[in-house]
Amino acid sequence: MEDEARLRTMVREEVARAITTIASTGRSSGPPAPKTVPPAVHDWFVLELWSENREFLKEFITHAFFFGLFVLFLDLFHQYLKRTSLELREKELLNKFHFYATAVTVVIFGVSFVIGGMRNRFWRKKR
């Protein structure tokens, strides 16, 4: 019983000392808390890959961007053709031209992407 009472008194004193230490200094007297470093603003996955000079990723992004722009232009042209008051024969001719222009665009961008990827993989400059 006596040991238990002495242990309770020691625990109360230690808790009171810790509380006063935390209240006066803002931190405990125990081991320091691990510091958490906030992530930097540029730690996004794509920006990290871009900053590491991954040429294949850069090639892919630029090709996708320009291909998307060109397809957007072709789609706007197609929407314009649907709303014009041309004769049916002229519309069919322009739609056929539009289809083949889209097909050629897909082939050109696909082949240039493959060539660019091969160039970056096999013939890139050594750092």
Image: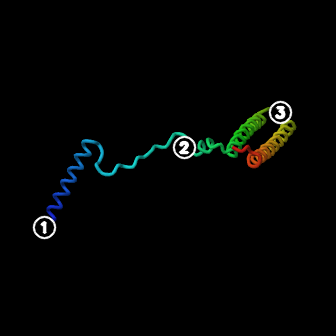
Front disc: 3 or 2:
2
Where residue 1 is drawn, which disc sits there? Answer: 1
Q: Is residue 124 left or right of residue 16?
A: right
Front disc: 2 or 1:
1
Q: How many marks do you count on the picture?
A: 3
Query: Does residue 5 sit above or below 119 in this rendering?
Result: below
- Mark 1 crowd level (few <14, some 14–19, many ≥20, 10 Å Cα): few
Q: Identity of the amino acid at label 1?
A: Met
At horizontal 69% and vertical 43% (from top left) the residue drawn is 127
Q: Which SS class for mark 2?
A: loop
Q: Quadrant of the N terminus?
A: bottom left
Mark sitting earlier along the chain (3/2): 2
At horizontal 78% and vertical 43% (from top left) the residue drawn is 109
Q: Identity of the amino acid at label 2?
A: Asp
Q: Quadrant of residue 51?
A: top right
- Mark 3 crowd level (few <14, some 14–19, many ≥20, 10 Å Cα): few
- Indicate the position of residue 70 as horizontal and vertical percent values: 75, 37
Q: Are marks 2 and 1 in contact (CB under 8 Å)?
A: no
- Indicate the position of residue 73 as horizontal and vertical percent values: 74, 35
> On the image, numbered disc 3 is attached to which residue?
86
> On the image, numbered disc 2 is attached to which residue?
43
Which residue, as the protein is rendered here, is positioned at the far left?
A: 2
